[in-house]
Image: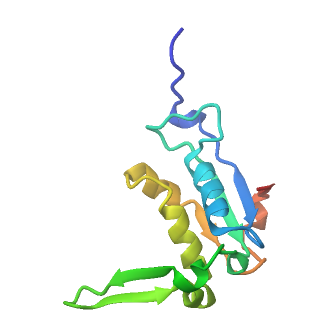
Amino acid sequence: MSTYMPKAGDITRKWYIIDAEGQTLGKVATKAADLLRGKHKPTFVPHMDCGDHVIIINADKIVLTGKKLEQKMYYHHTGYIGNMKQVKYKTLLEKKPEFVMTKAVKGMIPDTTIGRQALTRLRVFAGAEHTHAAQKPEKVEL
């Protein structure tokens, strides 16, 4: 019996929508990362990009458990000597909730060309409205 190897023409991409309202950041990001990679499909192979499109709505209504809202920090460096910036996640969630969700999903996807391709199929929206109704996305329950 030989191993099944999908060809590029065999891959069909579906659209999924995840409502993040009241859900924890990690649970939503994990589910989105699995859908983006295609790990839920029986035809998954790690060396090919066979994932689907994912829309995440209500990113501004996610929940961080414990004291993470006050204690968890986002760090970035400006490129100048001594310019390490830090921002609390509470502030980040108020100003850029899409960035918080995107960063969480990006951390769960491999740092390879396949991972970068998968991230292009992620769409995150702060509110309940999205611009991809024409694709008829399926709702995913967590």
- Quadrant location, the C terminus: bottom right
Q: How is the image coloured?
A: rainbow
**Where residue 139 sits in the image (x, y, percent)?**
80, 57
Q: Nearer the viewer, residue 10 or 39?
A: 39
Q: Decide: is 90 above or below 37.
A: below
Give the residue furthest to the top.
1
Q: Is residue 99 left or right of residue 63?
A: left
Q: In the displayed structure, would residue 137 be above or below residue 95?
A: above
Residue 25: name its quadrant: bottom right
Q: Residue at x 55, y 63 (%)?
A: 105
Q: Is residue 35 left or right of residue 118?
A: right
Please name whichever residue, 86 or 42, is drawn nearer the observer in this view of the structure: 86
In the rendered image, residue 22, in percent from the top left (x then y), is placed at 77, 72
Along the viewing direction, whichever of 6 and 112 lies nearer the viewer: 112
Quadrant containing the N terminus is top right
Q: How many marks?
A: 0
15 relative to 87 in the view: left or right: right
Residue at 51% in and 60% down: 119
At horizontal 64% and vertical 75% (from top left) the residue drawn is: 66
Q: Position of residue 34 (x, y in %)?
A: 60, 49
Q: Image quarter for residue 56?
A: bottom right
Q: Nearer the viewer, residue 37 or 27?
A: 27
- Residue 15 is situated, as x and y percent measured from the top left of the image, at 70, 54
Residue at image location 38% in from the left, 55% down from the top: 111
